[in-house]
Amino acid sequence: MDDLEKILRAKRYEKGAISFDRKEVKFKLDKDGRPKGVYFKESKDANKLIEEFMLLANKKVAEYVGKRSSTPTFVYRVHDKPDDMKLRDFSNFLKKFGYKINTSGGVNTSKSINKLLTNLKGKTECDIFAGLAVRSMAKAIYTTENIGHYGLAFDFYCHFTSPIRRYPDMMVHRLLDRYLKKKPSVSQEEFEEYCKHSSSREQLAANAERASIKYKQVEWMKDHVGEIFEGTITSITEWGFYVELDGNLCEGMVSLRDLNDDMYSFDERNYCLRGRYTGNEFTLGDRVTVKIARADLIKRQLDYILITDETENNKE
């Protein structure tokens, strides 16, 4: 069975499916719901086996309906090709760090992104570039108009396997049952409205999930204010840079006003902060040491202070 999973996965990648294996942070909670520990959700071989079979089931159900001679109305899960401008922006950004991707589109582009992320695996910038790659892609949505699923490299795809927790899956079950009984097609206009509503609610749920994770991260770090952590710079702005901490992925900002050793300005072209007098630079993927300065639960915001050799010397 394990071999079969690997064969199915390899076939998807060969056809141009994109792999975004990113760390997912989880919390251990006490009886009052407060975080008492942080861990990463690990995708093991058993998880990957189930995932491949679920993808296969979703694909085959969509094919069964979508490939019929008189195609009835159906609820597809579609993912459009990347926007050309976003893809060029991502490519130009990568070039600043010495990396390249194929932007010709289709399978060539997806294989190029996969190769880049595979080569970066284990490096500090891997998760950063994977996140940026995701943002350069279109969002997957529900619709009655099938255009295929770019990210999975499927011509037909739907959500069928989780009717208990997702309403689009329930719609798919009902439609499949209807068509197996040789009943006529439902109204496309009516079901397209259901699809639009499902897509919008899905986005709201995703936003709520991100907000809840950020809240728990800040709640966890409130007990660690004043402590020192190692981390990686994940984003640069004109007002400072963001650092993601090792071990818990808690992201916070080191503000420009707290960098006291020089006057720093944002170099947009080279995507870095550069000191006017010292020439010191902070750029994406740099490893830094920070102290937790503030944890604001209301704003769901963490503020860090950069720790340098000079900082430590001043303490002495």
Image (cartoon, grey):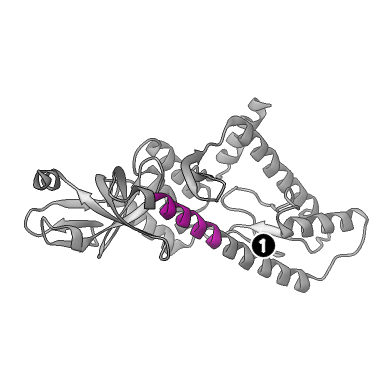
Q: Is residue 7 left or right of residue 233?
A: right
Tell me if I can see residue 23 in this picture. no
Secondary structure beneath dot 1 equals: strand
Quadrant of the snapshot with the C terminus: top left
Q: Which residue position holds label 1?
A: 142
Q: Residue at x 25, y 65 (%)?
A: 239
Query: Looking at numbered disc 1 in the image, what kind of residue is underneath it?
Result: Tyr
Q: Quadrant of the N terminus?
A: top right
Where does residue 169 sit, x and y in percent of width and height? 74, 55
Q: Which image quarter: residue 208?
A: bottom right
Viewer-closest of 276 and 228: 228
* Residue 284 percent coordinates (x, y): 29, 50
Outermost residue on the left side: it is 277
Q: Nearer the viewer, residue 252 or 106?
A: 252
Q: Nearer the viewer, residue 228 or 123?
A: 228
| Residue found at x 56% / y 59% | 206
Q: Which percent across, then down, holds residue 246?
A: 36, 41
Q: Is residue 31 visible?
A: yes
Would residue 247 be counted in the magenta stretch? Answer: no
Q: Is residue 77 above or below residue 291?
A: below
Task: Give the x, y percent position of residue 303.
Answer: 30, 57
Magenta residues (range): 207-221
Q: Is residue 72 left or right of residue 47?
A: right
Frontmost residue, 95 versus 197: 197
User: Going by the image, does 307 lie left or right of 251?
Assistant: left
As for residue 210 lying within the magenta part, the answer is yes
Q: Among all residues in the image, which is located at the extreme front? A: 32
| Count of labels in the image | 1
Q: Give me the residue at 69% from left, 60% from top.
A: 146
Q: Main secondary structure of the magenta part?
A: helix
**Circle 1 residues within 10 Å: few <14, some 14–19, many ≥20:** many
